[in-house]
Image: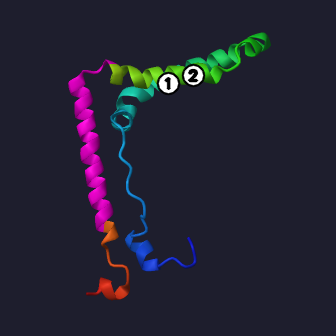
Amino acid sequence: MPTNANLLNVILGVEATTLPRKRSPFHHYVKLYYSSHMKEEHERRYLVAKRLYEDATEEEHKAQKSFDSRFQNSMDTVVLIPTCLGTSIFRAEVAKKAEVEHLEELEAWNARKQAPKTPQQFHQ
């Protein structure tokens, strides 16, 4: 914590200086559904890629430059398939949820910015 910081502002949480970022519908989908829909498949694919890497010979390691890209491609598939195959209605619902959540975050941010900044303002 900087030495010139106003401790009252730090305690009240007023130090948030940047606006909350709005998530894209894709990122909002991942936030909402990763643990319930994607995590298990992601971990399964990770273990498969890890086993392939561990079982590979030295020649296969040289021939296959990057096992990480194979894992990354599988992770992209885990995330992209539900969002791409989902109906346009589902995608619109996720976009609407992202918009509503962003507006709520903005309201909370504005409330924090209007919080008292000095002890005199706090006691008025």
Q: Which region of the structure is painted magenta?
A: 85-111
Q: Amino acid at mark 2?
A: Phe
| Residue positioned 67% across, 21% down in the render | 66
Magenta-span inclusion, residue 89: yes
Q: Is residue 74 left or right of residue 24?
A: right
Label 2: few (<14), some (14–19) or many (≥20) C-alpha neighbours in 10 Å? some
Q: Amino acid at mark 1?
A: Met
Q: Position of residue 121 (x, y in %)?
A: 31, 85
In the rendered view, would you say 52 is above or below 35? above
Q: Which mark is residue 75?
A: 1
Q: Is residue 71 left or right of residue 37?
A: right
Q: Secondary structure at mark 2?
A: helix
Q: Is residue 120 left or right of residue 93?
A: right
Q: Say which of 103 and 37 sits in front.
A: 103
Q: Say which of 19 and 58 sits in front.
A: 19
Q: Say which of 80 and 33 sits in front.
A: 80
Q: Name the quadrant containing residue 110.
A: bottom left
Which residue has dot 2 on it?
Answer: 71
Q: Position of residue 21 (x, y in %)?
A: 38, 49
Q: Secondary structure at mark 1?
A: helix
Q: Which mark is residue 48?
A: none
- State the separation of the CA atoms marked 2 and 1: 6 Å
Q: Are marks 2 and 1 in contact (CB under 8 Å)?
A: yes
| Residue positioned 35% across, 38% down in the render | 28
